[in-house]
Amino acid sequence: MKVLLDFVDRHRRGAAVGIYSVCSAHPDVLRAAMTHALAGAQPLLIESTSNQVNQFGGYTGMRPADFRDFVHRLSDEVGLPRERLILGGDHLGPNCWQAETPQEAMARSEVLIAQYVEAGFRKIHLDCSMPCATDPAVLSDEVVAERAARLARVAEAAWARAGGEAPVYIVGTEVPVPGGAHEELDSLAVTRPAAAQRTLAVHQEAFAAVGAGAAWARVIGLVVQPGVEFDHDKVIDYRPDLARELSATIAGHPGLVYEAHSTDYQTSDALSALVRDHFAILKVGPGLTFALREALWSLVDIEQEWLGPDASPDLRQTVLSVMQEQPGHWQKYYQDSDRVRLDLQYSLSDRIRYYWSHPRVAEAARRLLDRLDRASPSGLPMTLISQCMPWQYEQIRAGRLKNSATALLDSSVHRVLQQYALACNPMNLN
């Protein structure tokens, strides 16, 4: 964790540096992130959320140790040294068990935290901001802090058993909903400076009260709302003028930066401004799988125009059929029946990301890529790439991108990550 501690120290001493966190379990996204990391000297921070990966398997079917092994297998395939990887756990707390009583949900959360730390995850986001079954609709800062401190104590005990580097922690009470807003947004309130100060004070007190003062010394980030979010089809862009006072507030807390969630779809300038204003840990997840889906849909169009009746079964139709058959991951989010088909495919909240690992979908995607690459060993028709993927067309013409279906797919993720890499390290021109 020296890498993260050093990064925070450099940022607090005035360097315009940050770090981005890839919050995805999609193998193609992770491979692309790893190949992108190979081109630079920065570490790669990969985080799984509690609903993706938990002691019951989450929606990926993976427990924390399984996800660690999965990431390590991919990094070995790509050639990215494991020591360049940092594993983190995002929204670790009662998020998955909000329908249960606080006692039941926190007991499950303790098991969750212990398994993450014992599996080698060392950046731990303690998120107890959500109410459980018998809680009031809005939890007080004191309750959130007390529960977070309880989980920090469990994490410290798990680290003592497992050994290795000490974990670092992220805390906060104004935590954006994982995966973007569920409702349509017109505006967003920035966290008040007094609220940020209070959050830190009550958490420090709660950590001390349970004997976790040593863990508090390794809290490196506070989750606040800087005024960035996205819903199904709109992005709330970062406005530095609205966050000026909040940005200045962190100056009184050495060793801390802000962690910004839901930065997906922000512009390059906005990402750079966030880092400059001390929102130095940038989380991105749905924006990466959204870019991947855009590339896959473009490859479907290329295949159908190029190969015609010999094209493989339509990946789009396969995905939509599976989503309609198994609506559990999207039904409560997409309520407008007139635009369900549009939202299923194109919504910025990207609920489609939950279906890429389905066997029928994964097989259809594999067949698409294999068929395109087999159809012409010299590459896909450049005219169709120009039509469907104009940015990639320019990259191929410039000699910066290989003409293959897999390379075109990876490049869609690389393009997003490059925005984050340049915002976090402006001198990194790779």
Image (cartoon, rainbow, N blue to C red):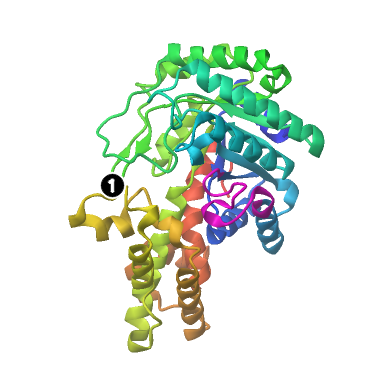
Q: Residues within 10 Å of mark 1 (few under 14, many from 20)?
A: few
Residue type (three-letter) at the residue carrying disc 1: Asp
Kindly tell me whether residue 386 is visible in this rendering: no
The magenta segment: 49-67
Residue 290 in the figure: left or right of residue 167:
left
Residue 418 in the figure: left or right of residue 386:
right
Quarter the N terminus occupies? top right
Q: Residue at x 52, y 22 (%)?
A: 144
Residue located beneath label 1 in the image: 233
Residue 300 sits in quarter: bottom left
Kindly tell me whether residue 171 is visible in this rendering: yes
Viewer-proximal residue among 215 and 61: 61
Q: Residue at x 67, y 43 (%)?
A: 86
Q: Is residue 90 above or below residue 192?
A: below
Task: Give percent across and percent down for residue 82.
Answer: 73, 51
SS class, disc 1: loop
The mark total stands at: 1
Residue 104 sits in quarter: top right
